[in-house]
Image (cartoon, helix red, strand yellow):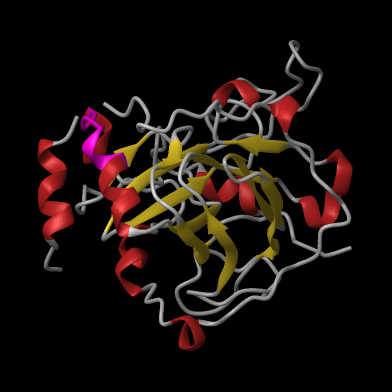
Amino acid sequence: MKLNLLTALIAATATLTGLVSKVETASAADFSWDNSWTQPTVYNKSQTGFNDTPFQQFVQAESVVLPNSGQFKLDPTQLNLKYDHDVSVYFINEGAGYRNQLAFNATGTTNKSGLLFNDISCEGDGCVGGWGGNALKFGDGVNIGNVTAGTQLDLWLRADGLNRGNSANIFGTETASNADGLQHAVAYAYNNYIILAFEDLYGGLHASGVDSATGKSNEGSDRDFNDVIVVLDVGEANVRELIGATVPEPSVTLSMFAVGAVGMFGLRRRRQTRTSN
């Protein structure tokens, strides 16, 4: 795939410390899931013109590491917008036995939050798994609306929220906001977009039993970050600003969705059958 000018600039960029507009990062205390939220209108790619195909190269099978393909690692907690933009979020793929849900929170000069996808599930050719549910097609998108300069964007995953509701774990982009104290989201810039990918299982790599610190159950996580994969359209100018303040890390040579994941362990955590409420 021929890389555009944005990708060519990636190799020369420096560590993400935030934009000129400095906004406090949201914390778990600042965010609560609103059960009255309803699924916003989902537009298919023929309606939006969004092409998901270039992003599917980053979606690998369970627990498989891929070589770098031109993506560039960002800090998912620092998605600060320097310019106004009409923001949209597009579904790329999912590799989860859970029926996950995704919401957003905007803080700063724009303050709003809401549901993005109520049931993140897909079936058929190209989907990572086939564990039930077929709510989304590749490239389906929702629109957040205008987000003004000086706003921080955060996305929040409610793991198996469709089934578990208020008992589900909620994972944010900030490690400190997560009950297990672990990172559950990775972010990358690619082709003028931001890619966000989530790990939906509580606990460390292959951890089992009860977490003595929280009383929550470890879920044998494979830490492959392919459970929910979305793309954010925050505007080319904002992506350039994010990249322009970031330095590549060694992990950029690995696939974005295979952080810490190796071997044959991924399918074990997927054996459950997904059912909706």
* Towards the viewer: 248 or 253: 248
Query: Any magenta on residue 248?
Result: yes
Q: What type of secondary structure mainly makes up the magenta span?
A: loop
- Check residue 276 for magenta coloring: no
Q: Could you say which is closer to the camera, residue 35 or residue 200?
A: 35
Q: Report x, y in % for residue 176.
A: 60, 20
Position of 155 compared to 15: left or right? right
As rendered, which of 218 and 181 lies closer to the eye?
181
Judged left or right of residue 128, residue 163 is right
Left/right of residue 266 with respect to residue 1 in the rendered view:
right
Task: In the rendered view, tell whether residue 267 sits above or below residue 121.
Answer: above
When the figure is inspected, residue 21 is found, relative to residue 123, above or below; the finding is above
Would you say residue 98 is visible in this rendering? no
- Of the 4 image quadrants, the one containing the C terminus is bottom right
* Outermost residue, top side: 213
Q: What is the x, y in percent for residue 160? A: 75, 50
Q: Which segment is the magenta one?
A: 242-249
Instruction: Residue 186: name its quadrant.
Output: top left
Residue plotted at (75% across, 67% down): 39
Does the image show residue 46? yes
